[in-house]
Amino acid sequence: MEISLNSDFDKFINEQMATDIVNDAMKIYIEIKTSSQCQIDMLNAEIQRGIDDYEMGRYMDGMTAYKKLMAKYE
């Protein structure tokens, strides 16, 4: 089925479609940006946790950690 529209209607429909596409794209962009910021915040929290542990003396050198793991799983 083919429908003929006058140029004003055709222009209006094309503009509406473009607006909808831009709106959808912006929604997706905001979702991605928000998700990325959330991941960055979580990573920063984990980094701070590691710094806090180190400052409180809750750490061990790599060789000691390796030996403990090997002993645990032997």
Image (cartoon, rainbow, N blue to C red):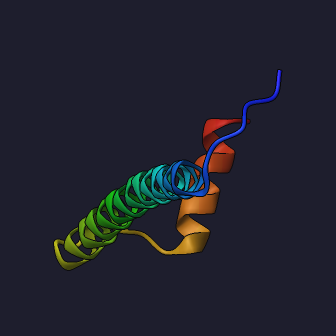
User: What is the number of callouts on the image?
Assistant: 0
Q: Nearer the viewer, residue 28 or 60?
A: 28
Quarter residue 42 falls in: bottom left
Q: Is residue 39 left or right of residue 44?
A: right
Query: Which residue is farthest front?
Result: 6
In the figure, is residue 44 to the left or right of 70?
A: left
Residue shown at 23% from the left, 72% from the top:
57
* Residue 33 at least partly seen: yes
Image quarter where the C terminus lies is top right
Q: Say left or right for 48 vs 63.
A: left
Residue 58: percent from the left, percent from the top?
27, 65
Q: Residue at x 54, y 50 (%)?
A: 17
Q: Can you give x and y, in whole percent of width and height, for residue 15 in the image?
A: 50, 58
Residue 28 placed where, x, y %? 47, 52
Q: In which quarter of the image is residue 63?
A: bottom right
Viewport quadrant of the N terminus: top right
Residue at horizontal 45 percent and vertical 57 percent from the top: 19
The one nearer the camera, 62 or 6, is 6
Task: Please provide percent x and percent y for residue 2.
Answer: 81, 28
Report if residue 58 is visible in the image.
no
**Depth order, front residue of 24/63:** 24
Q: In this view, does 48 lie above or below 69?
A: below
In the rendered image, the residue lying farthest to the top is: 1
Task: Specify whether 57 is left or right of 12.
Answer: left
The residue sitting at 54% across, 66% down in the picture is 64
